[in-house]
Amino acid sequence: MSLFIQPSIRLFSGSIVLLALLIGACASDTPSSVSVYDSNPDIRPEPFTTFKGRTTIVKAGDNLYSIAFEAGFDTADVARWNNMNQDDTILIGQEIRLYPPNRNSPTFSGAESKTIPANNIVVSTQNLSSPSKWIWPTQGEVISQFSAQHQRNGIHIAGENGTPVSAAAAGRVVYAGSGLIGFGRIIIVKHSEEFLSVYAHNSRIVVNEGDSVQQGQKIAEMGSTDADRVKLHFEIRQFGKPVDPLKLLSAG
């Protein structure tokens, strides 16, 4: 009986060896160390970017203000790190650095302690640290308060769809659009080199980027874009960092 089984075993073993050789030959055609991205730079993944020290790639609708806002940095810093002015045009696909360059970098301007002024700022010297300088952007109940600990960067004010939203202080619209995930239709107003204000989840925007706005001027209508209900998300940022709006709006 052993004489009958042994050839079968040899045949089975030979089949395994042949299969292994075929698999090995196929595998050798595509070395494991080669990535599809190496042969086609057009489909390489974007650089790792989440804020805090890396880079980001400009997409349609971006400007330095929206990039800095989303990353949580002062626009002046982002401009300086990239050796440009805050209002310079940036191109889709351009890489923006979100960290200070090396001092030895040939593109470093050496102006790390200076603020690069934006063009056409309508309010150059506002003392906005006082609550008397701000007004409420809309009427309604505050349903969510600022909390640095819980990363709530602003307040939520409830209201009806279409309720007017006004500029809390005079300034210039530096971003108006819907390119920031989670904010719906959003407006960013620059009031000085120190302060920005933010108005999100609007149903309608009635101003354009570059427009000068007066305190109390209607800039949008309340809505629920990218939100669970009709509300205004309102922020005040000082040198790029969120501050409690209620401490500045209390006298408004």
Image (spheres, rainbow, N blue to C red):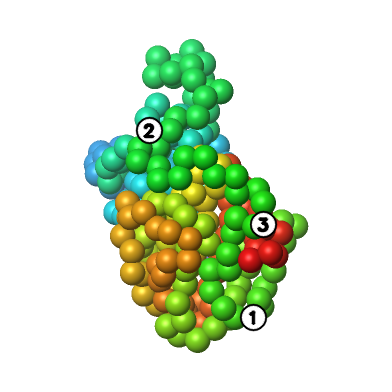
What amino acid type is highlighted by mark number 1?
Answer: Glu
Between disc 2 and disc 3, the foreground one is: 3
Residue 85: numbered disc: 2
What amino acid type is highlighted by mark number 2?
Answer: Asn
Which image quarter holds the C terminus? bottom right
Q: What element carries label 1?
A: loop
Q: Which one is earlier in the sequence, the residue at label 2 or at label 1? A: 2
Q: In this view, does 167 lie to the left or right of 87?
A: right
Residue 157: numbered disc: none
Tell me the CA gap for discs 2 and 3: 30 Å
Q: Callout 3: 10 Å neighbours few (<14), some, many (20+)? A: some
Q: Name the residue under label 3.
A: 131
**Residue at x-position 43% and y-position 18%:** 109
Q: Is mark 2 on a helix, strand or loop?
A: loop
Q: Which one is earlier in the sequence, the residue at label 1 or at label 3? A: 3
Q: Can residue 179 be seen in this view?
A: no
Q: Mark 1 points at which residue?
A: 141
Front-lying residue, 78 or 188: 188
Confirm or deny contact between disc 2 and disc 3 (CB under 8 A): no
Tell me the CA gap for discs 1 and 3: 19 Å
Q: In this view, does 98 lie above or below 216?
A: above
Q: Is mark 3 on a helix, strand or loop?
A: helix
**Residue at x-position 35% and y-position 41%:** 120
Q: Give the quarter of the image for residue 244.
A: bottom right
